Amino acid sequence: MEWDLRELRFFVTAAEAGSFTEAAARLYVSQAAVSRTIASLERSLGETLLHRIPRGCELTSTGRQVLPHARRVLAEAQRFTQFLDSRHAVLRHGYAWAALGKHTTTLQREWARQHENTELELVRHNSATGGLAEGLCDVAIVRVPVDEKRFGSAIVGLERRLVAFATDDPQWARRRSLTMAEVATRPVLIDTRSGTTHRELWAGTARSPEVVEIHDVEGWLDAIAAGRGVGTTAESTAHHHARGDITYRPVKDGPRIAVRLAWWLDHEPAALGDLITATTRLYSM
């Protein structure tokens, strides 16, 4: 059985109009074109959908069964068309734990002023590519290296590494900064998929920390607040996830974290150059 959207559209229009002549007027085609198209659909089905009557046409019993399904298919096709059209008007910007920290709002406001025809939409997804590999965004902020065979990337800035711990921590509550060696004395909570902390940060040091895997930022924050461990993270996390029961402090000898924009190699967004320029400028300020 073969059918197409044009046949369904002609059938639904004729059924709703109750007349081939009126359907032709609504579709801006000839009455003969309406008759031929609906006849083609009926041949595919092997059944009659519309009976001709002196004043127009009326649904057969099969036509009454087919009509609601045809309407749903046409509605879904319309939604798909709108989705395809909107892709050219929206730049979906993915991220995992945090977007651009203190620069996020500035970027959104400046982008809206300078790109009236392209909306910048933030999309959060907890994965190594911030939703890029999953098809949820067009470009993503990532803080871990990406697969260069699949994705292009550009470093747009560097962020300090912070340590997060419970605000009522009796030993660290008054500290203004800490060291990687001090962090290693506590259980360290890490997200192995998209986080910026890994055992190799302590390679060659006298002590490697006990590692506890956490797979989303909310669980990471709750575990730290409960005193189950501490975590190191990019400074943007402190801006996006400020909590009274968690304190963030700089790790003075912690390696800085590269902030990258990543995109599919075979699908470079039209406004990518502008986004790289705008983001790099904000990180350089």
Image (cartoon, grey):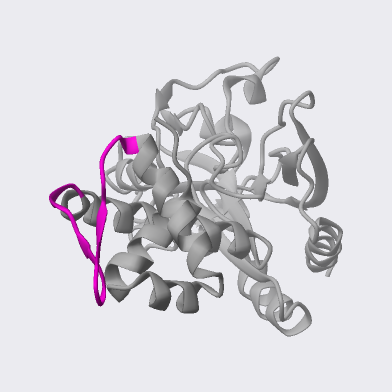
Residue 259 makes an appearance in the image: no
Residue at the outermost left position: 61
Nearest to the observer: residue 83 or residue 25: 25
100 and 57: which one is in front?
Answer: 57
Taking the image as shown, residue 156 lies to the left or right of residue 112, namely right
State the residue at coordinates (67%, 35%). 144
Coordinates of residue 283 in the picture (x, y in percent): 79, 62
Q: Is residue 224 left or right of residue 142?
A: left
Q: Is residue 235 above or below residue 45?
A: below
At 35% from the left and 49% from the top, the residue drawn is: 169
Residue 70 in magenta? no
Q: In the rendered view of the protein, which quadrant contains the N terminus?
A: top left
- Residue at the extreme front of the image, as rendered: 54
- Work out which quarter of the rendered image holds the C terminus and state it: bottom right
Q: Residue at x 48, y 79 (%)?
A: 25
The residue at the far bottom in this view is 113
Q: Which residues are magenta?
A: 45-62
| Image spot of residue 80 (x, y percent) | 49, 55
Q: How many marks?
A: 0
Q: Nearer the viewer, residue 167 or 243?
A: 243
Whether the magenta-drawn stretch holds residue 52 is answered as yes
Q: Is residue 152 above or below residue 104?
A: above
Q: Quadrant of residue 270?
A: bottom right
Residue 234, x across and y down, in percent: 61, 48
